[in-house]
Structures are given as C-alpha cells and as structure tokens.
Image: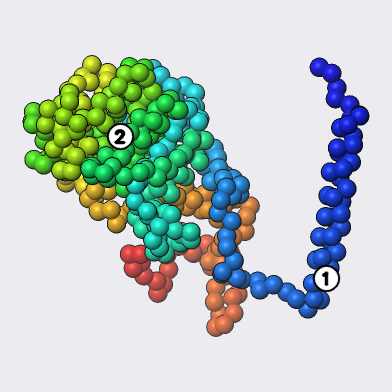
C-alpha cells in the first residue's frame, strides 16, 4: 500500500477546514470566560433533559453489569435460580454468538405515547406501564448480547384485529435477519444473561426448523377444532428460509378465504392470528422439524400461573395471568445481577466496610471500651446476645 502524503489540493482543503475550527475553539473559550463571575448552575436541576438517544454510557453500564457472567452459548447445562439443572440433549448446533444476525423484535400499531408508555418522551420508573417495562427489557436483552433490536410501529389493517400486524412484519424481518425473536410486550426473558443461542440449542432448533412457539395451558378455550392445544404467538423464534417465507405469507393470507376455508372468521374473532396459526398453518406446515413446540412450563406463563397447567415460565415469562407483574419482573431481571455484585463489593476482603465492634468492645454508658482477653474468650460464637429479637424481616 502506498502511504498517503498530504500534498497538493489535500493540504489546501485541510488548511481551509482548520482555520474556522481554530476560530471556533478560541470563540468558545472566550465565551465561557464571559459568564458572570458569581454564576453557578443549580447543582440539581430536575428539568434538564437527560440524553437518552444512543447514550454510549448506557451501553457500557449494561455491558459492565453483565461482563463475565453471560452464559456461554454452547455450555452443556444451565442451573436456574432454584438450583434446577437443564442439560442440552445432544451436541449444540450453535457454538458461536450470532450477534446482529439475531433480531429482537417488538411490534405494535398503537400510539403508546401516553405517560408511562414507551413513546412518551420522558419515561420514569414511577408510573411506568407494564408493557413499557416489557419492551425496555427486550431492548436491554439485545444490548447485553449484541443482538439487533427494532421496535416496528406498524400500520393498521382496515379489517383485521390489531394483533394481525405481527405476521407481515415478522415476514419482512425474516428477509433481513437470519433469526428473529418476537415477543409480545408482556413476554420477558427471566434470565437476561442466558443467550438465545443457548435456548435454541436446548430446544433443538435445527436447520430445518421454521419457527418455535410455546404451547398454551391445557384448558378448554385453548383447543382447536382438531382437539389440539393452540400454540401461543406471543413468543416466536423464527429462522430465515424460503419455506419460512412461504409459511408467513400463507399465514398473512389465511383470512382471505383462498387456501384455508373458514379462516376469514379470525380476522376479528379471538384468538385472531393465533387461532389462524393453530387451526390452519400448523397443519399445512407439518414436516417433523417445521414447528418446534416449546413446553408451557419453560416458555409460557409465570410462577403466578403455575396452577394453569404448570406454566411457570422458567426461561420465558408470559404475563397473561397479570400484566401488572411485568414491571416487577423487569426489576427482578436487573436486581438478580446487581445485588450479588453490590454485595460482593460490600463484603470484599480487605475493604473495611464492616467493622466488627462486637469482637473488640463493650459499652460503658455512652462509651465503647475495649474488651479484656478474658471477656473476649467468653463471647458467644454465633453473635447472638442480649436484648435482640429476630423479627422475621
Ligand atoms: C455442566 O456442564 C459442565 C461442562 O460440561 C460440567 O463440568 C458440569 O459438571 C455440569 N454441571 C452440572 C450441574 O451437571
Ligand atoms: C443433567 O446432567 C447431569 C450430569 O452432568 C445429571 O446428573 C443430571 O441428572 C442431568 N439432569 C437432568 C434434568 O437430566
Ligand atoms: C430435543 O431433543 C431431545 C432428544 O431428541 C428430546 O429429548 C427433547 O425433548 C427435545 N426438546 C424439544 C424442546 O423438542
């Protein structure tokens, strides 16, 4: 390669751009010196707009919190917060992180611009709507693992219920990304440090798989006309392929009464696109690997819904039981990582945050006086003593 020497017209261009820059710097330096000498900005100004857009420090805060604890994508097992161990059933298909080949996808056709909603310009923890918490947690999940993230504000169908917009939007996203993870806003990953690649290994997503969805609870309203339980379309992991395009196209065209007789009913009737998928698509795309049915207990429901067919949302939580719980779950998904690290720092050897005055002193009226060696030997080992009570908190 030839070194690029600054000569001829380039040198002139550089000089020309340098002159106004120097002028600007001189001007700015002078300008700040002109502030009145007694002027000090308020130390705490609530109304100052916070930089929210593309804040590089937010990215590093999240990365720092999860650094070193992200679960390896091809690890043989995963131990959950209750100590239960989940093993891969075979050799993992995914051994490398997929990065931006994965799209975490939110889709909504509503304005969502009221206070506490995601499109409001100033979102606060106080008053945060549950569905905003869900979307923020999807955004954070993508940030942790370096996946792509998009919130698609979809147009409306004139003659179909709003949830139908998911279908064509997912279809289009599967043209630009190899894998998409669509979640309703009341769906969240319970363990944000667990990458989707590990779950795709665990759930055996093969190169032939079109999509994975969780089964709904075994309850009468969830049965299709063939007495099979519906798949829930609130959590969809789909993989790019020609056949996947065909499936999503057929799904989106289902209510047009061409290929699937009777599907037009689901334009507006519950359960809309989910019923269309359950009644028709899953039977039309029925090669063994086409659709992976995920266990309700692992990818649907929440602990509060365990009485609904055991759907306790081990990995993926879906709060149809009570959408109001999504905010608490979002806090959970951060505190489960922040707390142990904060506590580690609190207890780290050598740091003197904890002063064991109990081992060295006793009280004498308002004073602390040193214990004698004899008194020290008599101290109870468990730290218990007089006039204290464990109140259960
Ligand atoms: C999980 O897998 C690792 C690596 O193969 C192994 O060393 C470890 O013993 C396994 N843990 C459990 C609880 O099975
Ligand atoms: C997971 O594998 C370990 C051995 O690594 C085994 O002891 C354990 O029973 C397995 N757990 C399940 C749920 O299959
Ligand atoms: C994955 O494959 C293993 C072995 O064939 C099987 O035991 C397991 O149930 C499968 N898991 C899913 C979610 O299909």
Residue closest to the far front: 158
Q: Quadrant of residue 51?
A: bottom right
- Residue 377 in picture, x, y percent from top left: 52, 62
- Asked if residue 50 lies left or right of residue 336, the reply is right
Tell me the element at label 1. Answer: loop
Q: Residue at x 8, y 28 (%)?
A: 226
| 147 w.r.t. 281: above or below | below
Q: Residue at x 12, y 27 (%)?
A: 261
Mark 1 Cβ inside 8 Å of ligand 1? no
- Quarter of the image with the C terminus is bottom left
- Residue 54 in picture, x, y percent from top left: 57, 47
Who comes first in sequence, dot 1 or dot 2? 1
Q: Residues within 10 Å of mark 1 (few under 14, many from 20)?
A: few
Question: Can see residue 331?
Answer: no
Disc 1: which residue:
34
Tell me the element at label 2. Answer: helix
- Residue 143 in picture, x, y percent from top left: 50, 41
- Residue 137 in picture, x, y percent from top left: 42, 47
Q: Residues within 10 Å of mark 2 (few under 14, many from 20)?
A: some
Disc 2: which residue:
167
């Amino acid at each position: 390669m030839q070194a690029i020497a600054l000569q001829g017209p380039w040198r002139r261009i550089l000089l020309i751009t340098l002159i106004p820059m120097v002028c600007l710097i001189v001007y700015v330096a002078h300008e700040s010196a002109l502030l009145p000498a007694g002027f000090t900005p308020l130390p705490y100004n609530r109304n100052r707009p916070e930089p929210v857009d593309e804040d590089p420090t937010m990215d590093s805060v999240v990365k720092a919190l999860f650094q070193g604890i992200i679960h390896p994508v091809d690890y043989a097992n995963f131990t959950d917060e209750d100590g239960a161990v989940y093993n891969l059933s075979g050799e993992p298909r995914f051994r490398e992180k997929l990065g931006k080949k994965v799209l975490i996808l939110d889709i909504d056709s509503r304005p969502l611009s009221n206070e506490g909603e995601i499109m409001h310009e100033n979102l606060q923890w106080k008053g945060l709507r549950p569905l905003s918490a869900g979307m923020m947690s999807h955004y954070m999940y993508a940030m942790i693992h370096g996946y792509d993230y998009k919130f698609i504000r979809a147009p409306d169908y004139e003659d179909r219920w709003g949830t139908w917009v998911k279908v064509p939007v997912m279809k289009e996203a599967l043209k630009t990304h190899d894998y998409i993870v669509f979640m309703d806003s009341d769906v969240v990953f319970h363990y944000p440090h667990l990458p989707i690649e590990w779950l795709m290994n665990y759930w055996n997503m093969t190169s032939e798989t079109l999509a994975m969805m969780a089964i709904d609870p075994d309850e009468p309203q969830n049965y299709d006309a063939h007495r099979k339980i519906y798949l829930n379309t609130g959590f969809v992991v789909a993989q790019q392929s020609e056949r996947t395009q065909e499936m999503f196209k057929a799904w989106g065209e289902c209510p047009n009464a061409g290929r699937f007789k009777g599907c037009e009913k689901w334009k507006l009737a519950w359960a809309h696109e989910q019923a269309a998928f359950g009644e028709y698509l899953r039977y039309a795309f029925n090669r063994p690997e086409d659709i992976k049915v995920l266990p309700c207990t692992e990818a649907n429901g929440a602990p509060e819904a365990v009485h609904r067919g055991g759907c306790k949302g081990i990995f993926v939580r879906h709060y149809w039981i009570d959408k109001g719980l999504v905010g608490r779950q979002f806090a959970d998904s951060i505190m489960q990582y922040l707390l142990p690290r904060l506590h580690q720092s609190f207890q780290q050897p050598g740091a003197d945050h904890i002063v064991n005055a109990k081992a060295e002193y006793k009280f004498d009226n308002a004073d602390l006086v040193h214990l004698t060696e004899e008194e020290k030997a008599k101290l109870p080992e468990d730290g218990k003593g007089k006039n204290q009570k464990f109140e259960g908190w």
